[in-house]
Image (cartoon, grey):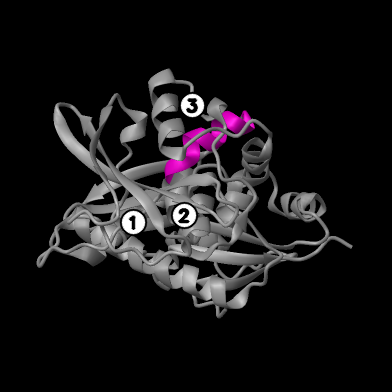
Amino acid sequence: MLAGGAIVVLGLPDLPFFWHRPFSYSKQAELKPGDADFPKLESRYPLDKLTRYAITRDGGNALTLPVADYRDAQGQTRRAMVNLPTNAAVPGPTEAAQQLRHDIWARAAKSIASHVGPHALFLSWWDDGQRLHLLSGADSWGLLPDAEGWRDGHERQFWLELAGGRDDGQKQRQLARWLTMDAAQAVKEMAEAVPKDKDAYVLVTVDDLARLGEIENLAGVSLPLETQVFPSGENFHALIAQVKRWAGESERTGKDQNDKPAQQEEAASNYLVQQLPGVGVRAWRVADPKANDLLITRLLPFTGSLNRPLEGLQLVYQSEQAYLSVYRLAKSP
């Protein structure tokens, strides 16, 4: 697998952050093989069923999430949220987002299936692990969420239903702890925790930031990561300049504006940008420099993490626009 250079402006539509606001959901449709509308999806295991969940918010339809049911090599029924290819001649922003994610995941799964051996184990968040398992057959650290990741009972019920169960162990809680601790220490602990007969990898996507509340709840911490949407205008370069100024504000807080030249302020800021077609961009910034070396910020394409390899982790695959990254974890001595 070949690793490409990270691109800070990701050019990807944002996933709606509906899970941080009141919403309702229902099964829009249940499709089985042979049905006229049953989608075509290249996967390691054939699908037994596909359920479309309609999520509504503020009285309107916000999102449709497709969830696949399948049986693994042992005959165990599993679920995975999937990104389906679109059939629309002129796809809108939502369809384009799904198509882009479908293509990125399809290429990543094909590369992973071709290059890793039967002893590979991927450390990834549960929804990434489910999707990877369905598409490539690769084993993951955990395939189910921890119910304690959500404080709201309605939200918890929704995600556990989509996931097909809950993790009764500590795997997601442990992964959340690693993601929110010093990266060097986290890499050391991960290497020690992985069984010696496994070849370990770490898989992350930019969409993992949508799981930040869940990760914080399980780790028992509050991370100094802030996000803001910047509406699009006629001048994209002016928009990015606005984002850079916002990203540097946390560095200037409590300081004289003349303390540092603008170039130094920009270099000190640590941020990540996602383009939202038809909307603008969503930017993330690290509000406290102490968080620059947390594992989650080092794994994702924040500006402060580019060209800063982590000892014990080797970047072996990265999708276009740095949306999805795979790292090989060195074995513990």
Which residue in the protein does label 2 denote?
131
In space, the residues marked 1 and 3 are separated at their CA atoms by 24 Å
Determine whether, in the image, residue 273 is placed left or right of residue 236: right
- Residue 251, position as x, y percentages in the image: 50, 47
- Residue found 56% across the figure and 26% down from its top: 148
- Give the residues drawn in magenta, as a range: 210-220
**The C terminus is located in which quarter?**
bottom right
Question: What's the magenta bit mostly, secondary-structure-wise?
Answer: helix
- Kind of residue at disc 2: Arg
Mark 2 Cα-neighbour bin, 10 Å: few <14, some 14–19, many ≥20: many
- Residue found 26% across the figure and 49% down from its top: 230
**Residue 216 lies in the magenta stretch:** yes
- Mark positioned earlier in the residue sequence (1 or 3): 1
Determine whether, in the image, residue 245 is placed left or right of residue 312: left
Residue 17 shows in this picture: yes
Determine whether, in the image, residue 159 is placed left or right of residue 88: right
Camera-near label (1 vs 3) is 1
Could you say whether the residue bearing mark 1 is in a helix, strand or loop?
A: loop
